Amino acid sequence: MLTSSPSCKDMTPFICPLCRSPFTKINNTEVCENNHHFDIAKEGYLNLLPVQSKSSKNPGDNKEMMSARRAFLSTGGYFPLAQKIAQISEQYLANIKQATLLDLGCGEGYYTNLLKQQLSSHNIVGLDISKIAIRYAAKRYPDIHFCVASAYQIPLLDDSIDLIVRIYAPSKAEELTRLIKENGYLITVTPAPRHLFQLREAIYEQVNSHAEENEAVKGFTKVEQITLNYELDIDDPQQLKDLINMTPFAWKFTPEKLTELLGQQRWKVECDFNIEVFLKN
């Protein structure tokens, strides 16, 4: 009996994390040539994080931090950053008909989805070590490939990625070099000197500035640096709480300092990002 051709969503870009061989989909399971089986979750994602690669039972951001981030991002607070990343990605992929882009450390898929909207003709893949985050991402954005995996052991083929977006995510230079094609790109986002300065000012007596730029990743040459700076005008205490709770500041605030901050009627908070583009040598 003839069957229809598999859709793009049916053809996973991921490989077996145990033996690095490609998958074949059998019913609702991905099976490699060495007969390693990985079931596709009902939400549509793959869990490719072997037990031996876990540093804890539930690695990645905790549920409270992810809930706060979802709530804050839904207010559009970081939309200018997402929009800028999508525009830059489109610019650097302009001469490629159908590129593959990896959102490394994609969390709940906020930036991944906006990349997909902006670059609809390209293949977009999201990866994060947090199973809770990936489950949410896959459920909300079913047209994107998501998987649970470590950024230090990425289950994708060598030289298979045209561009990696890395927003605040740690990674290993050797993995980036292995994955990105010759003349491919890495786009990183890190906090610039004034990022969330007013929150840091409320915590510390002396505020240290973030770095103005970062050294090139080994194996790459920096080709562009962009600073994105804008101010949030917040009049909703819950939005401010969510912004705090999605960052490490949640553990830095004493109850007294947090009460003092929340006692204000309105808050102006700077967003300041370093966006750096690197070309693989």
Image: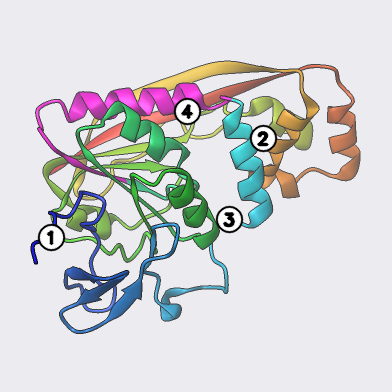
Sequence-first disc among 3 and 1: 1
Q: CA distance from mark 1 to mark 2?
A: 49 Å
Q: Amino acid at mark 4?
A: Phe
Say which amino acid is labelled 2. Answer: Leu
Element carrying mark 4: strand
Inspect the magenta stretch and tell me whether residue 241 lies in it.
Answer: no
Camera sees residue 76: yes
Alpha carbon separation for disc pair 3 and 4: 21 Å
Q: Nearer the viewer, residue 34 or 84?
A: 34
Residue bearing mark 4: 273
Residue 70 x/y as whole percent: 59, 40
Q: Residues within 10 Å of mark 4 (few under 14, many from 20)?
A: many
Between 229 and 143, the one lying in front of the other is: 143
Label 3 sits on a secondary structure element that is loop
- Residue appearing at x 20%, y 55% in the figure: 179
Q: Which residues are magenta?
A: 76-102
Image quadrant of residue 27? bottom left
Work out how far the residue at label 4 is from the one at label 2, CA to CA, in angstroms.
Answer: 15 Å
Residue 61 — which label? 3
Q: Nearer the viewer, residue 159 or 74?
A: 74
Cα separation between marks 4 and 1: 49 Å
